[in-house]
Image: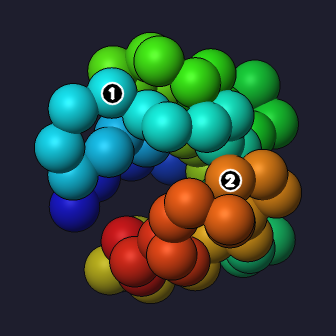
C-alpha cells in the first residue's frame, strides 16, 4: 500500500524487486490507470539489481479515496509473473 498526496509525487513510492535475491533479468512496469503516474514513466530495474524504484503521483483533482492500481509489465515477463494490484 502506498499513500500519495494529491497534486504531488511521492518519492520512491513504488519499487520492483525479486522475491528472493537480485533480479534475473531487466524489468519494467507502469501503472495501467489514468489517475496515477510514475516519474520516470515506468518503474525499471536491470538484471542483477536488488530493486528499482520510482516516484508516484496523482492530480490534485483525484478523488480522495482508496484506489487500486494495476500494472502493465513492459519487460521481464519471461522470468516474472504479472505484478499484483497495488
| Residue 47 in view, yes or no | yes
Picture quarter with the C terminus: bottom left
Picture quarter with the N terminus: bottom left
Q: Is residue 74 above or below residue 33?
A: above
Q: Is residue 63 above or below residue 53?
A: below
Q: CA distance from mark 1 to mark 2?
A: 13 Å
Q: Is residue 76 left or right of residue 80?
A: right
Q: Is residue 86 above or below residue 30?
A: below
Q: Residue 29: x percent and y percent?
A: 68, 53
Q: Front-most of 19 and 73?
A: 19
Q: Residue 4: x percent and y percent?
A: 39, 46
Q: Is residue 83 above or below residue 19?
A: below
Q: Is residue 3 left or right of residue 71?
A: left
Would you name the residue on which mark 1 appears? 22
In the picture, residue 70 is in which quadrant?
Answer: bottom right
What number is the disc on residue 76? 2
Which residue is found at the position 35% from the left and 40% from the top?
17
Q: Is residue 70 left or right of residue 19?
A: right
Which residue is found at the position 54% from the left and 77% from the top?
82
In the picture, residue 66 is in which quadrant?
Answer: bottom left
Amino acid at each position: 500500500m502506498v499513500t500519495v498526496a494529491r497534486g504531488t509525487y511521492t518519492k520512491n513510492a513504488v519499487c520492483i524487486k525479486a522475491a528472493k535475491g537480485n533480479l534475473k533479468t531487466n524489468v519494467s512496469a507502469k501503472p495501467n490507470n489514468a489517475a496515477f503516474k510514475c516519474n520516470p514513466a515506468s518503474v525499471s530495474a536491470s538484471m542483477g539489481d536488488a530493486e528499482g524504484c520510482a516516484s508516484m503521483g496523482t492530480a490534485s483533482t483525484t478523488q480522495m479515496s482508496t484506489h487500486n492500481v494495476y500494472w502493465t509489465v513492459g519487460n521481464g515477463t519471461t522470468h516474472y509473473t504479472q505484478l499484483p494490484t497495488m
